Amino acid sequence: MLDIQYIRSHPDIVKKAVADKLLNSDIDRLLEVDRRIRETTAAVDRLRAERNKLSRNMSGEARTAREAAGVRGRAIKTKLAALEEGLAGLKREYDGLMLTVPSIPAPEVPLGKGEADNVEIRRWGTLPRFDFAPRDHMAIAEGLDLVDVPRAVKFAGSRSYFLKNEGVLLEMAICRFVLDQLIAKGFTPVTVPLMVKESAMLGTGYFPLGYEQAYRIPEDELFLIGTSEVSLVSYHRNEVLNLEELPRRYAGYSTCFRREAGTYGKDTRGLYRVHQFQKVEQVVIGRADDAEAERLHYEILGNTEAILQALELPYRVALACTGEIGLGQVRKHEVETWMPSRNGYCETHSCSTLNDFQARRSGIRYRDEDGTLRYVYTLNNTGIASPRILIPLLEIYQNEDGSVTVPRVLRPYLNQREKIGPKPR
C-alpha cells in the first residue's frame, strides 16, 4: 500500500507501475473517490459545526427562533445522515482500491512480462556429470523407500505425499542446518501460527490477489499460511518499535500450505509442486531507509547463496522483471537450483524487498531520531523449502548403486552418516 499523498502527487508514476507489473488497478477512480471523500468530509464537518452551534444557542433564543432552529436542526440531521451514509460507501470503495495499488519497482528492475524476461546475475557451481544413466528424484526416493505418493493420493488427493525413513531425517537435517546458519547470523528462530485471520493475509499483501491460492477454514474465518512471512510480519501488527532494535531478523520455521490453483496438469510427477511443505523463511524488519533496505536485501540473498554453496548445489541468481515481482515487491531476486531431471535451473528461493508496503497495511511503525513516526520496511527470503530442495539434493548426490551421498554439512545432523542406501531385502 502506498501513501495516498504520494499517489496524489505522482499519479503517472503509479500508473506506470500498474502497467509494468501487469496489474489491474484503477488509479483515476481511486483519485476521484479520494477527492469525493475529502469534499464530503468537509461538508459533514460544516454541518456538524452548524448543528453544534444551534444546540448551544437554543436555550437563550425566543420561541420563534427556537422553532426555526429546530426546523434547521432536523434538516441538518437528514442531510448529515445521507452524507454520512455516502461517505461510508466511499470509504469502503477507497479501502478496496488502495489494496490494489502496487509498490513502485526499484530503478534496476528490468521491464518484462514473464520469467523469460528475468535477468541472470550469476551462476555458481559445476553441473554434475554422470558416468551412468541418472534417475530422477522420484525413482531414487522410491528405490530407497524415502517417499510414498500413491498411498497419500488415495486418501489425501493429488500433490500429496509421505516422506519416510531417511527422507524424514534428511528434511529435518536440512531445516535444522539452515536454522543454525541463520541463528549464527543473528536471526531469532520462531515457530508460528499456521492459521491466521484474513487481516493478516491482507496486511502482508497476500490478499486480495491471492485468495485462490489459500486454504480457507470458513467455520473459524481463518486461513492456512503459505509462508511464515505472514505470521512473522503480523507479529508486530499495530506496534511502534524501538529504533535501537532495528533491524529485527527472524527465521520462521513452519509447515506451509498452497492450493496451487491454476496449475492443473503441471508438474504432477514428483515433489516439485505440492500442497504442503516445510520451510525456513528469513524475514527482516528495518528502518525506512532505501540504502539500508538494499543492503539488507543483499544480506539475506547472500545467506541463501551461502546455504546452497555449503550444500554444494549449483544454482543461478536472476533479477526478476516487473511482470514477475508482484504487487508489493520493490525488487526481487529468484534463486534457481540445478535439477538434472528437469535439465534446468528451477526456482527454490525468492528474495524480496517490500519497503513500507506491508507495514502500512499492518500498522507497523517506529519512532525516528527526531521523534517522527515512520513505517518500517520489510524484506523476506526463503531459507530453505522442502521437499522441493530434495529434488536437486537426491539427483545431484545419487550414485550408480541407487544410494545417495549425504552432503558433508548435513552429516552432523544424521549421526555422521555418509550415505543413504537401499534397504536390505
Image (spheres, grey):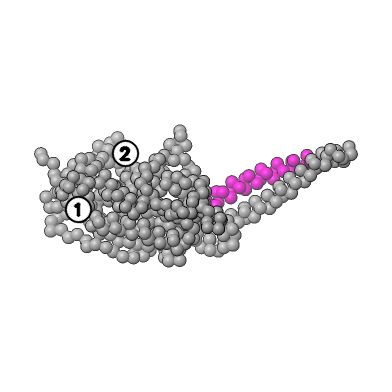
How far is disc 1 from disc 2 in space, using C-alphas?
36 Å
Of the pair 27 and 417, the residue shown nearer to us: 417
Residue at image point 70% right, 41% down: 81
Point out residue 132 in the picture as x, y percentages from the top left corner: 13, 56
* Type of the residue with mark 2: Gly
* Number of disc labels: 2
SS state under label 2: loop
Q: Which residue is mark 1?
A: 408
SS state under label 1: helix
On the rendered image, what quadrant is the C terminus found in?
top left
Of the pair 93 and 349, the residue shown nearer to us: 349
| Residue 80 part of the magenta segment | yes
Q: Is 215 drawn above or below residue 123 in the view shown?
A: above
Of the pair 304 and 39, the residue shown nearer to us: 304
**Label 2 CA crowd tier, 10 Å (few <14, some 14–19, many 20+):** few
* Type of the residue with mark 1: Arg
Residue at image point 12% right, 58% down: 131
Q: Which residue is mark 2?
A: 157
Q: Is 392 drawn above or below residue 58 in the view shown?
A: below
Residue furthest to the left: 425
The residue segment tinted magenta is 73-99
What predominant SS class does the magenta segment belong to?
Answer: helix
Point out residue 380 in the picture as x, y percentages from the top left corner: 40, 53
